[in-house]
Image: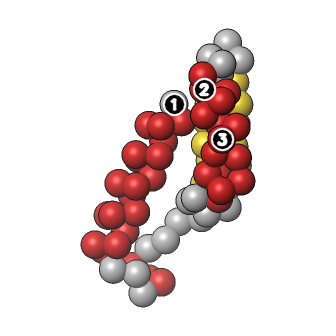
């Protein structure tokens, strides 16, 4: 199986940088993987509601690429 790995600092960097390529690779039968190196949390002053919303967004985007 062919595989592709995207390494992104922040969520959405992968989409802005190579989202079209990821979708094309998916259509070509590649197994894709996505690594995000940062994580937001409440200690940064971010609300738990926003964190939950962002987690759901990440899940939706992940489903599109896999």
Quadrant in the rendering for residue 5: top right
Please give the residue where the numbered disc 3 appears in the rendered image: 20
Crowd band around label 1 with a 10 angstrom C-alpha radius: few (<14), some (14–19), many (20+): some
Q: Residues within 10 Å of mark 3 (few under 14, many from 20)?
A: few
Mark 2 = which residue?
A: 26
Number of the front mark, 3 or 1: 3
Q: Position of residue 44 (x, y in %)?
A: 48, 84
Q: Splitting the image into 4 quarters, where does residue 24 fall?
A: top right
Q: Residue at the left extreme?
A: 49
Residue 35, x across and y down, in percent: 62, 47
In the rendered image of this protein, does residue 60 appear above or below residue 36?
above
**Alpha carbon distance from label 3 to label 2:** 10 Å
The answer to whether residue 37 is visible is: no
Q: CA distance from mark 3 to mark 1?
A: 13 Å
Residue at (54%, 36%) from the top-left corner? 65
Q: Secondary structure at mark 2?
A: helix
On screen, 17 above or below 4?
below
Badge nearest the viewer, 1 or 2? 2
Q: Secondary structure at mark 3?
A: helix
Q: Nearer the viewer, residue 39 or 53?
A: 53
Of 52 and 61, which appears nearest the observer? 61
Give x and y (percent) for residue 1. 67, 12
Q: Check whether the beta carbons of the residues at disc 1 and disc 2 lie within 8 A of each other.
A: yes
């Amino acid at each position: 199986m062919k595989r592709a790995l995207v390494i992104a600092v922040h969520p959405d960097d992968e989409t802005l940088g190579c989202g079209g390529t990821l979708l094309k690779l998916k259509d070509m039968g590649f197994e894709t993987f996505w690594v995000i190196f940062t994580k937001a949390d409440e200690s940064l002053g971010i609300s738990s509601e926003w964190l939950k919303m962002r987690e759901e967004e990440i899940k939706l985007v992940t489903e599109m690429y896999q």
